Amino acid sequence: MKFLKKQDSELYDAMYSELTRQTENLELIASENFVSRAVLEAAGSVLTNKYAEGYPYRWSKKTGKLKYELYGRYYGGCEHIDEVEKLAIERAKEIFGAEHANVQPHSGSQANMAAYFALIKPGDTILSLELSHGGHLTHGHPLSFSGYLFNIVSYGVNKNTEQFDYTEIMEIAKNVKPQMILTGASAYPRKIDFAKFREIADEVGAKLVVDVAHIAGLIAANLHQSPIPFADVVTTTTHKTLRGPRGGMILCKEEYARDVDRWVFPGTQGGPLMHIIAAKAAAFKEALTPEFNKYQKQILKNAETLASSLIDREFNLVSGGTDTHLMLINLGKKGESPSGKKIEGALDKAGITANKNTVPFDTRKPFVASGIRLGTPAVTTRGMKENEMKKIAEFISLVYQNYDDEEKLVEIKNEVKKFCGNFPLYEELK
Ligand code: DSN
């Protein structure tokens, strides 16, 4: 960052501190990851200079099919940008076996917005997962566009198993008769049966949207059932398990492709972020390699080991464990245990980054919450394996026992820094 350092030391200092934080701390936020240098290069490239409203293709009037050609854009000079977006699209389709991919959504929220608009109308009913049971704000929270524009009815997890009960969800769907059913989650540690959701959607004549933001990498590696054969539209982010730049993407059947495209641009966005689309293309190439497969397998092994080590240390995990990349510690009820907010703060002081999260049937408000969400994608990228997960469980347990002891937390932070030093990250950037 030599130019930035010379021109704007204030900004440089803040950014350099963030690099230090990322390398010295243990990153356990389930939705974060570390991209490769190739992805970083693409994201920080001259492609940020280019406007390219439109698409690198047109829909043929004769055949109704998509045809790559120049002049699908509203700007000149797009001949190279077109190649970049084409690479991203074709690689995305290959990874997921999708009929159509739109790689332009700036984020997962915008991907969701365009997907809903492509399938239903404002005022229609969406049946989606309750936020406090693992859903996402864009799945219907009143403060998000989704809750503002659509009539939202929620399903949750079963009180005993803390997992989906598909018979219960079918009953709710039959009563509600939604126009659209939405599944996928931000904090659900178990696999989701998309075929079951298709059955439910078909029973009530609803469209099915699946938001795979968290588990896209696992799906790409065939370690989780794919929603592609079952969903009308699939949305995702590209930066979580998929390990690309921050951004969104929509995959869909050809019959919805034109509507999806229209609702991304011009429906909800203007110019695509071409540097980010290039970074998506770079990440998608990585996702097509055998190494990526191994990496995803290791994410799961690490999550399993971290979960069982936490259980051995008497932590209570939502649903009793995990079969994905994430888990949720249920700290206990209000008045009987420290809150998620309190433990998140203590972990931060000890150099461990995680986030507070509501647990199903939480007795606290979302900003305080009774849970801590943990994920293994980022630490796995650093090269950590099962033994390190056992050590991480020990760190977490130590923090939990000493959450009010500032001195002890600093001691743990020094240990964490040493531990992370064994797994170099972005060394050449320092
Ligand atoms: N905010 C993301 C997460 O942390 O899970 C979801 O998009």
Image: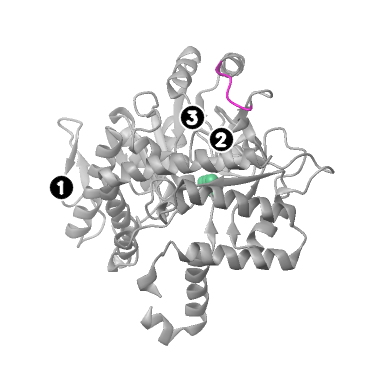
Q: Earlier in the sequence, mark 2 or mark 1?
A: 1
Horizontal and vertical percent position of residue 257:
31, 34
Magenta span contains residue 163: yes
Label 3 crowd bin: few (<14), some (14–19), many (20+), radius 10 Å: some
Q: Amino acid at mark 1?
A: Glu
Q: Quadrant of residue 230?
A: top left
| Location of mark 1 (residue) | 69
Residue drawn at x 43%, y 47% is 268
Nearer the observer, 396 or 98: 396
349 versus 194 height, above or below:
below
Q: Quadrant of the N terminus?
A: bottom left
Q: Which residue position is annotated with label 3?
A: 191
**Between disc 3 and disc 1, whose residue precedes?**
1
Cβ atoms at labels 2 and 1 below 8 Å apart:
no
Decide whether residue 152 is among the magenta residues: no
Q: Residue at x 31, y 65 (%)?
A: 41
Residue 115 x/y as whole percent: 43, 37
Query: Secondary structure under badge 1?
Result: loop
- The magenta stretch is 162-166
Give the label, 2 or 1, closer to the camera.
2
Secondary element under disc 3, as helix, strand or loop, is loop
Classify 10 Å Cα crowding around label 2: few (below 14), some (14-19), many (20 and above).
many
Q: Residues within 10 Å of mark 1 (few under 14, many from 20)?
A: some
Q: How many marks?
A: 3
Q: CA distance from mark 3 to mark 1?
A: 40 Å
Q: Is residue 121 left or right of residue 271?
A: right
The alpha-carbon separation of the residues under discs 2 and 1 comes to 42 Å
Does 371 sit left or right of 226 as displayed?
right
For disc 2, the marked residue is 188
Colour mode? one colour
